[in-house]
Amino acid sequence: MIKNKMSNHKNKIIFITGGAKSGKSSLALKPASLYSVKKAYIATAEPLDAEMLERIDRHKRQRGLDWDVFEEPLKIGDSIKKIMGEYPFIIIDCLTLWVSNLLTRQDNERFIEKELQKLITVLDLFHNNYGSQLIIVSNEVGMGIVPDNTLSRRFMDIAGMLNQKVAEIADEVYLTVSGIPVKIKG
């Protein structure tokens, strides 16, 4: 059972990575589901088409009603900063959608670097000062082929670098494979 594999101890950053549909989001919800407390969910997905709207609805049903949801496609560092200390559990789902949003809506190197650095700074602050559990979900982008176009390679490079930085800061890191979490740090 996941509660034996993933710590329920507070004041932690937990990073969950894995392939698409590997069970990352379900795994992220498990520790918080054990408690009837206020919980925050920072969602980076945007309902840009019918298929994505269905995915978002499926995630909402999976979470249930005891979550305060903050939809933030671009400035997740600011969102975390605003709610730090208010919630014992905060989930960010997911970093790779966030990177995609940054590239497709604000394809400006300076803006992207600023937002990435803001997130890392906020994670350091969070990690050192708040008695909450922050769970961050991201896709693993380094196990496939190198894409054949510039934008996709840029996405892979930014997401891969960001995943490395978040994993370095995190207390625990899990790789999800076919719904099974494999603890790789912590």
Image: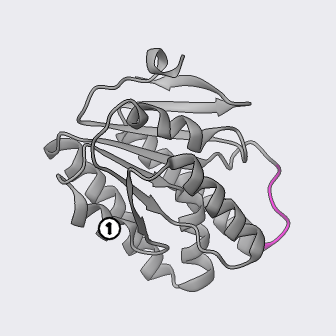
Q: Which quarter of the rendering shows the C terminus? A: top left
Residues in magenta, as a range? 145-149
Q: Which residue is mark 1?
A: 79
Asked whether, in this view, residue 28 is left or right of residue 182, the answer is: left
**Of helix, strand and loop, which one carries label 1?**
helix
Q: Residue at x 80, y 55 (%)?
A: 146
- Which is nearer the eye, 4 or 162? 4
Is residue 107 visible from the viewing direction of this image? no
Main SS of residues in magenta: loop
Q: Residue at x 63, y 62 (%)?
A: 57
Q: Residue at x 49, y 39 (%)?
A: 28
Give the colour scheme of this rendering: one colour
Residue 32 in the image: state x and y as whole percent: 39, 37
* Vertical placement of residue 114 versus 43, above or below: below
* Vertical placement of residue 154 versus 12, above or below: below
Q: Residue at x 42, y 35 (%)?
A: 33
- Amino acid identity at mark 1: Ser
Q: Quadrant of residue 49?
A: bottom right
Q: Which quarter of the rendering shows the N terminus? A: top right
Residue 83 in the image: state x and y as whole percent: 24, 61
Asked whether, in this view, residue 118 is left or right of residue 59, the answer is: left
Residue 137 in the image: state x and y as whole percent: 52, 47
